[in-house]
Image: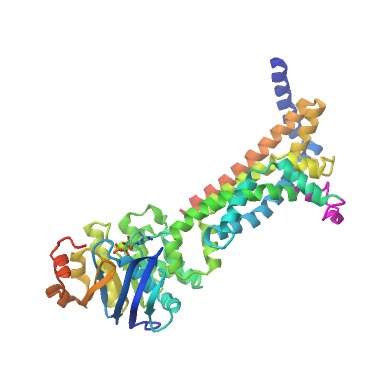
C-alpha cells in the first residue's frame, strides 16, 4: 500500500446548499479496518457523506481529516458510483484509463486491463464498447477500473442497488477478495441483507446525521437506538 | 421558359461533365482554390473553436455565459456583414491596411474563419457539455488535470466534433457574400467556385454557372463522404 490514509476524522462536517443543510454536522472517526458499511434509508445522506470523505462534495462547515491533505488522499482512493460511469470507449480502454492518466506505459496498462478483466469476468468483452454491457457488467467494469490503480481505499455508493441477485453476489465476491488483498472499503447500502453479509463496521445514517456506529456483530445483535432497531427489523424509518 | 431552363440544366450537366473529364485547367484551378481556402479556414477555425468549446463546457469562469450567448448570436451573423467588417479592417486606411491583405486568399480565409468559428464552437459545445455531464463525477474523482479533462472530452466526442467540422466546411465552401467583398473575385487570384458562379450567372452564362455549381456540390458531397467513411472505418476497426 502506497500510504496509509487512516485514521479518518470528521469534526462537525456538513454540507449545505443555498443555506439549507443537507447533511451534518457529522462527528465520526474511522480507522478503516476491513469493510465499513454506511447504512440508512434513502435520503439519509449516505452519498453525500461518502463524497465529503472523498473530497468531491463541498464541505461548508467543519473538517474532514486524513493523515494527508484531501487532494493527496484522493489520489490513493477510488469512487464507484451508484450509476456506473462508463467512458465511451472499449472495456479495455475503460480499464486502462486511470493508469493512462498516471502516465503508465501503454503496454503495461493494457496488460493490467486484461488481468483485471479476467478477475471480474469481463475478459470476453474486452474489445466491446462499454456502453453495450449490461448494468451488472458495467458496475463490475467500474469496480475493476477503481481497483486497477491499487488504491488504499475504495468508496462504493450503493454499487448493487439496481442489480439482480446474481450480479450482486458476484460483486460482493469481488469486494471481499479486494478486502482480503488489503484494500479498505467504505460501501453504502440500504440493503440490510448485504450489510449483514459483508460489513465489519457499520455507520448508521438518519436524517443527514450519523445516528449510530459500531462493529458489525454488536450493531446487528444489539443496536443501541430505537431507530436502528426499527431499521434492522425492516420498519420504515425516516 | 420552363423548357429553356431544363435545356440549360441539361447543357450545364453536359458542360460540367466535359469540363471535368477534360480536366479543364481553369476549372481545376478555381475548384482547388475553393478547397484550399475553405480547408485552411476550417483547420484554423477548428483549432480555435474546439478548445474554446471544451473550455466552455468544463470551466466555470466569469464570462462563460456571456461568451456562449455571443457565440450563438455570431452564428446568425450575415456573412455579408462579416465581409464588410473584414474589408474595413483590411482596407488601406484600416487598422491592418499596412499588411496589404485585401483581395488576397488570406483575406478570404480570415472572413471564413470568422463565419464558421461560432458555428463549430456552438455545435461542439453542445455535445461536449452532454459528455461532460456524463463524465463529470468520474473525472473529478480521478483528480484529472484541466488538460487531461479537455483531451478526454475531445477524444471521446470526436465523432460529434467531426460532424461540427463538416457543418463548418459546408458553410464555408458554399459562402459567397463575404469572400466576394474581401477577395474581389479576381481571375487567377481570388476567384473561387461560388464567386465564379455569381459572375457567370450575371453574364448570362448559365451552362458554365451550372457546371461550376455541380462541381461545388460534388466537392461538398465528396468531402462529406470521405469524412463519413473515415469515421466508419475507425469504428469498425476499433469496435
Ligand atoms: N444536489 C442536491 N441538491 C439538493 N439537495 C440534495 C442534493 N444532493 C442531495 N440532496 C439532499 O441531501 C440529502 C441527502 O442525500 P443523499 O446523500 O443523496 O442521501 P442517500 O444517498 O442516503 O439517499 C437528501 O435530503 C437529498 O434530497
Ligand atoms: Mg445515495
- The vertical placement of B128 against A143, above or below, is above
Q: Is residue B101 magenta?
A: yes
Which residue occupies the foreground of this view, A97 or B236?
A97
* Residue A40 visible in the current orientation: yes
B50 displayed left or right of B196: left
Q: Residue at x 67, y 39 (%)?
A: B219
Quarter-of-image position of residue B83: top right
Quarter-of-image position of residue B142: bottom left
Query: Residue B157: image x %, image y %?
Result: 52, 54
Which residue occupies the foreground of this view, B191 or A225?
A225
A97 displayed left or right of B154: left
Query: Residue B68: image x %, image y %?
Result: 58, 53
Which residue occupies the foreground of this view, B53 or B142?
B53
Which residue occupies the foreground of this view, A181 or B23?
A181
Which residues fall within the magenta stretch?
B92-108
Q: Residue at x 45, y 76 (%)?
A: A71
* Residue A119 visible in the current orientation: no
Query: Residue A203: image x %, image y %?
Result: 24, 73
The colour scheme is rainbow
Quarter of the figure with the N terminus of chain A = bottom left
Q: Is residue A77 magenta?
A: no
B226 displayed left or right of A172: right
A3 displayed left or right of A201: right
- The vertical placement of A17 against B67, above or below, is below
Query: Residue A149: image x %, image y %?
Result: 41, 73
Q: Residue at x 57, y 47 (%)?
A: B163
Quarter of the figure with the C terminus of chain A = bottom left
Which quadrant of the figure shows ligand 2? Answer: bottom left
Amino acid at each position: 500500500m502506497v500510504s496509509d490514509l487512516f485514521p479518518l476524522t470528521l469534526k462537525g462536517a456538513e454540507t449545505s446548499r443555498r443555506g439549507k443543510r443537507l447533511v451534518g454536522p457529522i462527528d465520526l472517526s474511522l480507522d478503516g479496518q476491513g469493510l465499513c458499511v454506511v447504512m440508512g434509508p434513502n435520503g439519509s445522506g449516505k452519498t453525500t457523506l461518502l463524497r465529503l470523505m472523498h473530497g468531491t462534495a463541498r464541505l461548508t462547515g467543519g473538517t474532514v481529516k486524513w493523515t494527508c491533505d484531501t487532494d493527496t488522499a484522493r489520489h490513493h482512493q477510488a469512487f464507484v458510483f451508484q450509476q456506473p460511469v462508463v467512458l465511451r470507449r472499449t472495456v479495455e480502454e475503460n480499464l486502462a484509463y486511470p493508469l493512462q492518466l498516471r502516465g503508465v506505459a501503454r503496454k503495461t496498462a493494457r496488460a493490467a486491463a486484461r488481468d483485471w478483466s479476467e478477475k471480474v469476468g469481463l475478459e470476453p468483452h474486452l474489445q466491446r464498447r462499454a456502453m453495450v454491457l449490461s448494468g451488472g457488467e458495467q458496475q463490475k467494469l467500474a469496480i475493476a477500473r477503481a481497483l486497477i490503480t491499487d488504491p488504499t481505499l475504495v468508496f462504493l455508493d450503493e454499487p448493487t442497488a439496481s442489480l439482480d441477485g446474481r450480479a450482486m453476489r458476484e460483486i460482493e465476491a469481488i469486494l471481499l477478495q479486494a478486502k482480503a488483498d488489503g484494500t479498505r472499503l467504505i460501501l453504502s447500502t440500504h440493503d440490510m441483507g448485504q450489510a449483514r453479509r459483508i460489513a465489519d463496521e457499520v455507520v448508521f445514517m438518519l436524517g443527514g446525521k450519523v445516528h449510530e456506529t459500531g462493529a458489525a456483530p454488536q450493531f446487528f445483535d444489539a443496536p443501541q437506538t430505537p431507530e436502528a432497531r426499527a431499521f434492522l427489523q425492516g420498519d420504515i424509518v425516516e | 421558359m420552363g423548357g429553356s431552363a431544363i435545356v440549360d440544366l441539361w447543357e450545364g450537366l453536359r458542360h460540367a461533365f466535359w469540363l471535368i473529364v477534360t480536366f479543364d485547367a481553369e476549372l481545376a484551378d478555381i475548384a482547388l482554390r475553393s478547397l484550399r481556402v475553405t480547408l485552411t479556414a476550417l483547420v484554423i477555425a477548428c483549432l480555435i473553436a474546439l478548445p474554446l468549446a471544451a473550455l466552455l463546457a468544463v470551466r466555470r469562469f466569469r464570462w462563460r455565459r456571456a461568451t456562449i450567448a455571443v457565440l450563438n448570436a455570431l452564428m446568425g451573423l450575415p456573412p455579408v456583414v462579416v465581409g464588410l467588417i473584414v474589408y474595413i479592417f483590411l482596407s488601406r486606411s484600416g487598422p491592418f491596411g499596412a499588411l496589404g491583405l485585401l483581395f488576397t486568399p488570406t483575406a478570404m480565409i480570415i472572413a471564413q474563419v470568422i463565419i464558421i468559428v461560432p458555428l463549430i464552437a456552438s455545435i461542439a459545445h453542445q455535445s461536449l457539455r452532454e459528455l461532460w455531464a456524463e463524465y463529470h463525477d468520474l473525472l473529478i474523482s480521478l483528480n484529472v488535470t484541466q488538460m487531461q479533462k479537455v483531451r478526454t472530452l475531445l477524444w471521446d466526442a470526436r465523432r460529434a466534433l467531426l460532424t461540427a467540422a463538416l457543418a463548418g466546411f459546408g458553410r464555408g465552401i458554399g459562402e459567397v457574400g463575404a469572400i466576394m467583398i474581401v477577395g474581389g473575385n479576381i481571375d487567377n487570384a481570388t476567384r473561387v467556385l461560388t464567386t465564379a458562379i455569381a459572375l457567370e450567372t450575371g453574364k448570362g452564362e448559365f451552362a458554365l454557372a451550372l457546371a461550376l455549381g455541380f462541381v461545388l456540390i460534388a466537392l461538398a458531397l465528396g468531402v462529406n463522404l470521405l469524412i463519413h467513411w473515415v469515421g466508419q472505418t475507425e469504428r469498425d476497426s476499433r469496435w
